[in-house]
């Protein structure tokens, strides 16, 4: 009798302890939350919630009021394939072999949060643009790393098993180019009120181009609003965390494909009013590699050790012991290879972004970071500076590069060669246009950042830091023009 009561007492204590563990670190199976992940394509850091005076992002802004707005979220790499590979694996893209490059397949040996959720009973799917671009099967996979493909969110919900929690990836292709010329102005976006980013010259062409980009940002935002309405109609809004972000910066010169904030910083909001206090703005550094561990932890699933991301759950839950990242690392391997310099590979770079500094290492300063100029084939605009998406701002900056000193300086910053080291003092130069690397007064800071960056790259087993990094240049390119040359045979 005595023994029995001791046992039941122990069981009782154990239950209390287990419940405490459940409530603080995960959820009981019946309460596992749904995850709605909305990711735009090429959406830079532009939203009403961040103070942009023109772009209208009502859905994002409402989620910011209801949830947690992150002001310093960065991608692993400012290129579609590696950025999405890093998001789905929770690992820096340089750990993902071919998928560090645009169009590179994502090998099946890299675990994905989507698969782990599916194995735990989640209904997992996506629509439109998931991981990619790239060949899913070439990676030894049977489906896109974002999950099973569905026509749309409605079909996904219709096919959901009763009582199964879900994880859905809404991958819009907005605001990726091409744009309908003049669509922004025609929709009523006031060109004169646009804050032209400091890395572009101010001209009617550039303003019109930014407005066309905003037009598609707004379309993405409206579509996410429609998804939220559907959640409500199905009674699913209470138990769903909604996450809205983008895969890297805007498709303009010195933005997408670059490690400056214009290329690597993205909007991020996470809203789950039933569980997490809303209306908070958080200035922590976040890497989008942190999303996979966050999603897993929120579902009560162990995070694989290979994931280099760090769960944000502690911050979302307001835990006082949560320690944010002190800085983020960013990198780039091959984006679009150059047609004119077939052996040039990519323009590998690594960077560390702290509160006050951005330090970039250009590992091959002999290569053109925006693609080769190719002026002799000027009629083939598609081959001009192939690493920059074609569009009115690109054309304007190239065509007017000799208009005056200002135009020339911005042209060089976007399209010119770059030194092996770049250092930007964000306290004096928030737009990251004045390289102070090599200046005496910054020698100590530069040395510290170099040491910190290299130590973390070594720890994360970056082939560019520990050896073998040239393989990134040798992987074949399967994307569109400008094509990787046919006569180049990748090494086995
Ligand atoms: Ca993209």
Image (tube, rainbow, N blue to C red):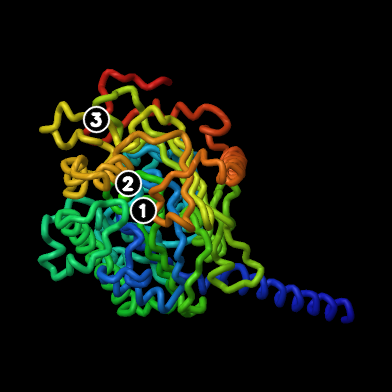
- Residue, x 31% and y 51% (percent of image)? 199
Name above or below for residue 244 compared with residue 276.
above
First in sequence, mark 2 or 3: give its number: 2
Residue tagged 3: 483
Residue 139 image position (x, y, % from top left): 39, 37
First in sequence, mark 3 or 1: give its number: 1
Nearer to the camera, 183 or 431? 431
- What is the number of the mark on residue 254? 2
- What is the number of the mark on residue 262? 1
Q: Is residue 4 left or right of residue 306?
A: right
Name above or below for residue 342 compared with residue 347.
above
Alpha carbons under labels 1 and 2: distance apart: 7 Å
- Residue, x 29% and y 39% (percent of image)? 415
Q: Is residue 138 left or right of residue 406?
A: right
Would you say the beta carbon of the disc 2 residue lies within 8 angstroms of ligand 1? no
The answer to the question of whether label 3 and label 1 lie on touching residues, with beta carbons closer than 8 A, is no
Nearer to the camera, 310 or 335? 335
Q: Is residue 299 visible?
A: no
Name above or below for residue 404 compared with residue 291.
above
Mark 3 is surrounded, within 10 Å at the Cα level, by few (under 14), some (14 to 19) or many (20 or more) other residues, namely some
Alpha carbons under labels 2 and 3: distance apart: 22 Å
The N terminus sits in image quarter: bottom right
Image depth: mark 2 or mark 3 in front = 2
Residue 469 image position (x, y, % from top left): 49, 29
Q: Secondary structure at mark 3?
A: loop
């Amino acid at each position: 009798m005595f023994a029995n009561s001791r046992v039941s007492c122990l069981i009782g204590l154990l239950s209390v302890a287990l419940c405490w563990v459940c409530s603080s670190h995960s959820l009981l199976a019946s309460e596992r939350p749904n995850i709605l992940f909305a990711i735009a394509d090429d959406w830079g850091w532009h939203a009403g919630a961040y103070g942009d005076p023109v772009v209208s992002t009502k859905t994002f802004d409402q989620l910011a009021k209801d949830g947690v707005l992150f002001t310093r979220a960065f991608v692993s790499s400012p290129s579609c394939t590696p950025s999405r590979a890093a998001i789905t694996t929770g690992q820096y893209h340089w750990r993902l072999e071919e998928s560090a490059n645009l169009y590179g397949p994502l090998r099946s040996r890299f675990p994905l949060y989507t698969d782990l959720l599916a194995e735990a009973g989640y209904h997992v799917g996506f629509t439109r643009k998931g991981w990619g671009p790239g060949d899913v099967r070439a990676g030894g996979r049977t489906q896109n790393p974002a999950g099973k493909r569905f026509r749309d969110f409605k079909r996904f919900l219709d096919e959901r098993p009763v009582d199964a929690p879900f994880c859905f990836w809404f991958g819009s292709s907005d605001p990726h180019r091409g744009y309908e010329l003049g669509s922004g102005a025609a929709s009523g976006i006031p060109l004169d009120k646009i804050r032209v980013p400091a890395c572009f010259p101010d001209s009617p062409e550039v303003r019109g181009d930014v407005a066309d980009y905003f037009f598609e940002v707004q379309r993405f935002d409206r579509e996410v609003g429609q998804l939220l309405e559907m959640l409500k109609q199905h009674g699913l809004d209470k138990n769903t965390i909604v996450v809205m972000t983008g895969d890297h910066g805007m498709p303009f010169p010195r933005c997408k494909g670059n490690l400056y904030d214009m290329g690597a910083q993205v909007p991020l909001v996470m809203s789950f009013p039933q569980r997490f206090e809303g209306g908070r703005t958080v200035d922590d550094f976040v890497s989008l590699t942190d999303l996979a561990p966050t999603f897993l932890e929120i579902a009560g699933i162990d995070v694989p050790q290979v994931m280099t991301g760090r769960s944000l759950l502690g911050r979302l839950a307001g835990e006082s012991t949560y320690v944010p990242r002190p800085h983020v690392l960013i990198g780039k391997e091959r984006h679009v290879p150059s047609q004119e310099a077939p052996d040039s590979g990519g323009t590998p770079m690594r960077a560390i972004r702290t509160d006050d500094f951005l330090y970039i290492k250009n590992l091959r300063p002999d290569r053109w970071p925006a693609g080769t100029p190719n002026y002799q084939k000027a009629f083939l605009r598609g081959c001009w500076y192939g690493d920059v998406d074609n569009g009115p701002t690109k054309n304007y900056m190239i065509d007017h590069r000799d208009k005056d000193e200002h135009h020339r300086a911005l042209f060089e910053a976007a399209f010119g060669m770059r030194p092996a080291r770049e250092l930007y003092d964000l306290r004096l130069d928030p737009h990251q246009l004045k390289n102070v690397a090599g200046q005496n007064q910054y020698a100590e800071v530069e040395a510290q950042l170099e040491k910190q960056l290299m130590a973390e790259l070594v720890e994360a087993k970056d082939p560019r830091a520990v050896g073998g990094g040239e393989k990134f240049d040798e992987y074949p390119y399967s994307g569109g023009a400008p094509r990787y040359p046919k006569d180049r045979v990748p090494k086995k």
